[in-house]
Image (cartoon, helix red, strand yellow):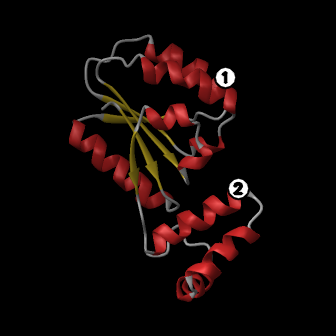
Amino acid sequence: MHAYLLIGTNSEELKAKSEELAKKFGAKIISFPLKKIADVRDLGSLLKTTFPEPTVIYSERIDEAGEEALNAFLKNLEEPQENIYFILTASSTRKVLPTIVSRCQVIRIRNQESGILNKENIELFLKQTAGQKLAFFGTIKDRDKAKEFVESLIFYL
């Protein structure tokens, strides 16, 4: 695998895991922002050069990048260059294009309370009967809110 997507909310832990992966590959790290399509074009220019030693392109918070930028970035993932690894970070996979996620090995970084939106509500939810739990989900009208709750529930468990 040449592309990794680290999911988590603690930027220090994400950076530490990135450095650990780079060390495993014996690679140097180049931090590269991928927020706008211009950033992706700059990356394309950089990648036209050959890299004699393993190199990690590290991009934080790609979930904040525009959809056009992420679509343009896909080509880099689909046609990997030798000695190049990508390490991308995001707070959640649901905020990243599914095509990007499918081309990366996803690694979830979890700290003590990471991703848990409201611990008390989750504890109350778990004490409910099956019927009450189903009724609760019936009250959530927004798909993203439902996903957030389920992810928080998974992190809690």
Give the answer, above or below, for where 83 lies relative to 12: above
Between 68 and 33, the one lying in front of the other is 68
Between 7 and 85, the one lying in front of the other is 7
User: Who comes first in sequence, dot 2 or dot 1?
Assistant: 1
Local crowd size for mark 2, using a 10 Å CA cut-off: few (<14), some (14–19), many (≥20)? few
Q: Toward which corner of the image does residue 57 lie, by quadrant?
A: top left
Q: How far apart are the alpha carbons under marks 2 and 1? A: 31 Å
- Local secondary structure at mark 1: helix
Q: Which amino acid type is shown beneath numbered disc 1?
A: Ala
In the rendered view, does 35 fall on the left or right side of 130?
right
- Local secondary structure at mark 2: helix
Q: Considering the image in quadrants, where does the C terminus appear? A: bottom left
Q: Mark 1 points at which residue?
A: 38
Q: How many circles with numbers are drawn on the protein? A: 2
Give the answer, above or below, for where 52 lies relative to 144: above
In the rendered view, does 74 fall on the left or right side of 143?
left
Q: x and y percent of residue 3 in the render?
A: 38, 33
Residue drawn at point x = 68 percent, y = 26 percent: 68
Residue drawn at point x = 67 percent, y = 69 percent: 137
Residue that protrudes farthest toward the front in the picture: 131
Q: Which of marks 2 and 1 is in front?
A: 2
Q: Which amino acid type is shown beneath numbered disc 2?
A: Arg
Residue 143: numbered disc = 2
Q: Toward which corner of the image does residue 52 lie, by quadrant?
A: top left
In the rendered view, does 68 fall on the left or right side of 48?
right
